[in-house]
Image (tube, rainbow, N blue to C red):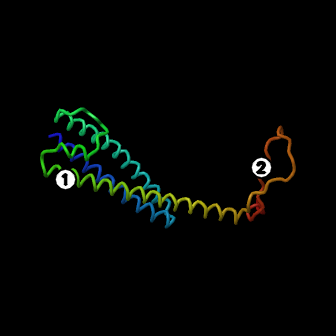
Amino acid sequence: MAVQKLLESLRLLLRLYRELIDLGWKKKDQVIGNRLNDLTETLAKESRVLKQLAEAETARVQAVLAFQRELGLQENPEAKLAELAEWMTDPAGKTELLHLMDDIGRAAGELRELNERNQKLVRQALGMVEAQLDLFAGVPEEEAVYRAPTRGAAEPKRSGLFDVWA
């Protein structure tokens, strides 16, 4: 019984990781296509899946503890799945556990790489926006004249296109 709960919790974790991977690919396309409204929607979905993932992780820990109790082992919520597989007597369950463990590891690695790639894309997009702002509004210029510290910091001046109409 505890073995089935453990396997179910792992299946759910794998499904949620795969869902996050799908959302990550969507985010990549949306950042590249500058579709901010779609990106906002995807981020909201991702937030919901992350909340489900946290709940699934809690269920996985409970399933691990129940499995350990059922076998009379010392309870360890941080037990590795490979260690648990050693204690399994059902060969089909053991095989599925090992496959799920591998699949979850691969999915987590893919998700990590995808998130790193998306972070780089977002940084590049922000750099382009900043460069465009500097092009239109001009680079902020600081006064070369000394100001007493009591007078406060000088506000940077922009000499660009938009300053003409200001």
Q: Nearer the viewer, residue 27 or 62?
A: 62
Kind of residue at disc 1: Glu
Q: CA distance from mark 1 to mark 2?
A: 64 Å
Q: Residue at x 45, y 65 (%)?
A: 29
Q: Is residue 162 above or below residue 57?
A: below
Q: In the visual, does 82 lie left or right of 70?
A: right
Q: Position of residue 46 (x, y in %)?
A: 40, 52
SS at mark 1?
A: helix
Q: Position of residue 144 (x, y in %)?
A: 85, 53
Q: Is residue 47 above or below residue 70?
A: below
**Quarter of the image containing the N terminus?**
top left
Nearer to us of marks 1 and 2 is: 1
Kind of residue at disc 2: Glu
**Quarter of the image containing the C terminus?**
bottom right
Could you say which disc has been placed on residue 96 in the image? 1
Q: Position of residue 21 (x, y in %)?
A: 37, 58
Q: Residues within 10 Å of mark 1 (few under 14, many from 20)?
A: some
Q: Which residue is mark 2?
A: 155
Q: Residues within 10 Å of mark 2 (few under 14, many from 20)?
A: few
Q: Residue at x 16, y 49 (%)?
A: 93
Could you say which disc has been placed on residue 76 in the image? none
Q: Residue at x 29, y 44 (%)?
A: 80
For marks 1 and 2 on the same chain, the one whose residue lies earlier in the sequence: 1
Labels 1 & 2 near each other (Cβ < 8 A): no
Q: Position of residue 5 (x, y in %)?
A: 20, 42
The mark total stands at 2
Q: Residue at x 26, y 49 (%)?
A: 12
SS at mark 2?
A: loop
Q: In the visual, does 99 lie left or right of 108?
A: left
